[in-house]
Image (cartoon, helix red, strand yellow):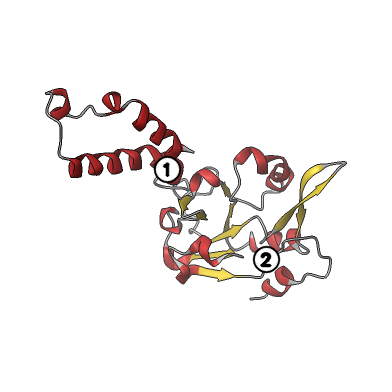
Amino acid sequence: AALLGASAVLTGGIGYLIADEDMLKGVAPPISDFRTWVRVNVGAMVKPYAEPTREALLPPWPLPGVPPGMPEPPTLVIDLEETLCCREWSRKHGWRYAKRPGFDAFLKELSKYYEIVLFSSQHMYVVAPFLESVMQRGMISHVLFRSDTKWRKGQCVKPLSLINRPKERLIAIDDEADALQDDLRHALIVPPYSEPDAQDRVLSDLLPF
């Protein structure tokens, strides 16, 4: 949408957009330079929608309330949609999140050993109602959202490089390898949970590992 908007502005108001020093002096750039100018400036316009809003996605360690001298735990980054839960629709309730079997036990046990980061590909306002009760149990340290992802060729990419924790002590669990394409060395890919299934055992089987 941002790119289409930029095109509309470019075709309808080129004189307004071209405001570099040469144009202000009345000197038209060669067509090759103009194309470069368009590419650079349209890229700059799109970047806020395609790049994370922050350079460091987590607050520095130690976190507020952590006793002084407590060692930094390893970090576990877990995808939310189709890894820990799935979205389902009903006429009575609209869209809701259905937990994957073993959801609570999985987070409760691993929160003893890891700093747990949930990473959702949705916007915060979509996920917040579901996460409210989960967060109150103290099993999750941080939640990241769509605004913290990179947008690349129609795919939300989760930038592990911006998670400011030691990479040798970080594991990411996801159902989509493409979502972690920047650093698959730290990825553990699991089967997707796309619809409620009481027989699913992925989390309970993964827990001992």
Q: In the picture provided, is 168 more to the left or to the right than 141?
A: left
Residue placed most toward the observer, 82 or 91: 91
Q: What residue type is labelled 1?
A: Arg
Q: Position of residue 119 (x, y in %)?
A: 57, 53
Observer able to see residue 74:
no
**Quarter that holds the C terminus:** bottom right
Nearer-the-camera pick, 61 or 106: 106
Element type at mark 1: loop
Q: Residue at x 39, y 42 (%)?
A: 47
- The reply to whether residue 84 is visible in this rendering is yes
Against 43, is 170 above or below? Answer: below
Q: For the residues marked 1 and 2, what is the alpha-carbon distance in whole angstroms?
A: 28 Å
Picture quadrant where residue 28 is located: top left
Please name the residue that numbered disc 1 is placed on.
54
Q: Earlier in the sequence, mark 1 or mark 2?
A: 1
Question: Does residue 15 appear to the left or right of 127 in the view shown?
Answer: left
Q: Where is residue 26 in the image (x, y as percent from the top left)?
A: 13, 24
- Residue 136 to residue 116: above or below: above
Query: Looking at the image, which residue is at 54% across and 46% down?
Result: 146
Of the pair 13 and 42, the residue shown nearer to us: 13
Q: What element carries label 2?
A: loop
Are the residues at dot 1 and dot 2 in contact (C-beta closer than 8 Å)?
Answer: no
Question: Which residue in the structure is indicated by mark 2?
Answer: 192
